[in-house]
């Protein structure tokens, strides 16, 4: 498909070449909608929790979204490989936008969590399709720039999203943070569909229906395991955790490339490392507004601006990756990004202590964002380079599944610590300190698994 697109318009020299422009804009709008929501929900969660109550469910607002997201990823990847990317884009947009509307009218925290399930399932389709589109509709030489553009799609939300969300929450209420986003994916659908519709399906896996069922089983197992983590009664914790692991681990093994759970060299290690990055990222990022507002006493708007800082530095890291990508040094770039991210997480952990000025938060978290952008974009490119031709959808789905499962675990573990340790005064500070230190340990493990990432880019792509 890449050669067909290139032949049709010889002027393709970048993502905004005439033949690709509507698709590029449509994909970027989808990223904009997704990014606004991700950043806004994190930014206004203290206000949502204060309005709807149930602080013990704080982490589930994120975990429910992310567990549903991994199911949507698998379904969309299979649908894209079977029928092409346009159909999963359609249902992804409809379900995602519906979830935004229902979230805006949620009367309680459980109702909001249910709406987040819809947002997650639809968002999973949108995320998987973005990578399939980059792999099948863009020439090899343009892909690194398009990946950087997708990361840049977080710039506008990063610049104004968290701060704007904080202002909206304080001025007219947090509900409008959801409702105002609902039309954006619909516009993206109109732009992207004409260029995605001609792209045929690839090579659908023979066990596609089993993979979908397995994805549901994995989500259920992960949900039970996360619920077990928040139980103070050890009997109830075992009653939930043991079946959760029994359902989740075999399902995860079947959905991932062989060797992923042991980080075997090549594609498995790359995907495993991406999963660990997302455990640590969301395990810290989702709780930064809570840490700054409730523990350090800053305003909601200032806490929101800290999330702005990471979006900007993340984009800087992604563009740095695009400049360094021709060197082909995938493993070295990934490990460098992980080391910088680890430094940022340790600095944010120190910020929980009263002797550190909380106004350093945007600087500390921006350091982490620089590392995330460098490592995330590098590992994503490595996955696309090592995917078998015609199976980019399956590889992209595995990548997104690792991202979302990791993110769900990171948020769920943090929520469990808050439920177990407490959310009043010094207890919340203690819970968040434990959480952030655990996420630093996860990044140390990621530095080890990154040793299995291919040293250099695939030889077939050199010189493209």
Image: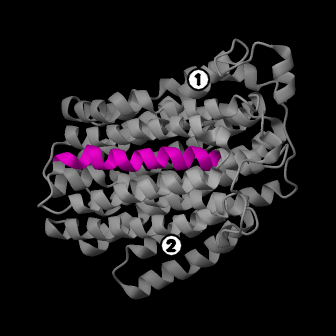
Please, is residue 389 above or below residue 353 in the view?
above
Instruction: Say what secondary structure mark 1 lies in.
Output: helix
Location of residue 197 in the rendering, given as x and y in whole percent from the top left corner: 78, 25
The residue beneath circle 1 is: 188
The reply to whether residue 52 is visible in this rendering is no
User: Which residues are the magenta region?
Assistant: 359-380
Please, is residue 103 above or below residue 71 in the view?
above
Q: CA distance from mark 2 to mark 1?
A: 36 Å
For the point 74% across and 26% down, which residue is it? Answer: 196
For the point 49% across and 83% down, which residue is it? Answer: 239
Q: Are marks 2 and 1 in contact (CB under 8 Å)?
A: no
Q: In the picture, residue 347 is in which quadrant?
A: bottom left
The reply to whether residue 6 is visible in this rendering is yes
Is 203 magenta? The answer is no
Q: In the picture, residue 22 is in which quadrant?
A: top right
- Of residues 219 and 268, the one nearer the viewer is 268
For the point 49% across and 36% down, which residue is it? Answer: 34
- Residue 225 is marked as 2
The quadrant the C terminus occupies is top right
Is 373 magenta? The answer is yes
Location of residue 142 in the rendering, given as x and y in whole percent from the top left corner: 69, 28
Instruction: Say what secondary structure mark 2 lies in.
Output: helix
* Mark 2 burial class by Cα count in 10 Å: few <14, some 14-19, many 20+: many
Which badge, 2 or 1, comes first in the chain's sequence? Answer: 1
Please, is residue 458 above or below residue 37 in the view?
below
Location of residue 118 in the rendering, given as x and y in whole percent from the top left corner: 53, 45
Apparent side of residue 115 relative to residue 427 in the rendered image (left or right): right
Q: In the picture, residue 435 is in which quadrant?
A: bottom left
């Amino acid at each position: 498909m890449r050669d067909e697109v290139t032949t049709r318009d010889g002027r393709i020299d970048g993502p905004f070449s005439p033949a690709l422009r509507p698709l590029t804009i449509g994909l970027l709008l989808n990223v904009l909608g997704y990014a606004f929501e991700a950043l806004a929900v994190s930014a206004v969660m203290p206000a949502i929790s204060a309005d709807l109550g149930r602080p013990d469910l704080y982490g589930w607002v994120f975990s429910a979204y992310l567990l549903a997201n991994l199911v949507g990823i698998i379904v969309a990847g299979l649908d894209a490989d079977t029928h092409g990317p346009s159909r999963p884009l359609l249902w992804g947009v409809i379900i995602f936008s519906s979830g935004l509307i229902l979230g805006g009218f949620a009367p309680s925290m459980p109702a909001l969590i249910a709406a987040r399930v819809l947002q997650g399932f639809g968002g999973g389709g949108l995320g998987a399709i973005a990578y399939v589109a980059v792999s099948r509709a863009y020439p090899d030489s343009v892909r690194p720039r398009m990946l950087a553009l997708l990361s840049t799609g977080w710039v506008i939300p990063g610049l104004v999203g968290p701060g704007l969300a904080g202002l909206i929450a304080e001025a007219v209420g947090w509900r409008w943070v959801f409702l105002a986003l609902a039309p954006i994916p619909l516009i993206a659908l109109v732009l992207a569909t004409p260029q995605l519709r001609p792209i045929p399906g690839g090579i659908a896996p023979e066990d596609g229906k089993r993979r979908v069922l397995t994805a549901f089983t994995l989500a259920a197992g992960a949900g039970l395991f996360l619920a077990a983590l928040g139980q103070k009664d050890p009997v109830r914790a075992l009653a939930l955790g043991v079946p959760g692991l029994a359902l989740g681990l075999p399902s995860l093994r079947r959905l991932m490339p062989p060797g992923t759970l042991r980080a075997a060299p090549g594609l498995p290690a790359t995907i495993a490392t991406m999963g660990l990055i997302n455990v640590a990222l969301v395990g810290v990022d989702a709780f930064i507004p809570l840490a700054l507002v409730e523990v350090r006493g800053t305003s909601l708007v200032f806490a929101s601006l800290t999330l702005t800082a990471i979006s900007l530095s993340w984009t800087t890291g992604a563009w740095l990756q695009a400049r360094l990508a021709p060197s082909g040094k995938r493993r070295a770039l990934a490990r460098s990004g992980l080391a910088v991210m680890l430094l940022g997480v340790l600095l944010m952990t120190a910020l929980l202590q009263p002797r550190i000025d909380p106004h350093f938060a945007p600087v500390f978290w921006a350091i982490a964002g620089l590392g995330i952008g460098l490592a995330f974009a590098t590992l994503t490119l490595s996955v696309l380079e090592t995917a078998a031709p015609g199976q980019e959808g399956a590889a992209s789905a595995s990548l997104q599944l690792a991202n979302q499962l990791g993110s769900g675990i990171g948020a769920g573990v943090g929520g469990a610590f808050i439920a177990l340790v407490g959310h009043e005064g010094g207890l919340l500070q203690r819970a968040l300190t434990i959480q952030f230190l655990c996420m630093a340990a996860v990044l140390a493990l990621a530095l080890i698994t990154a040793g299995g990432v291919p040293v250099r880019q695939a030889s077939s792509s050199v010189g493209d």
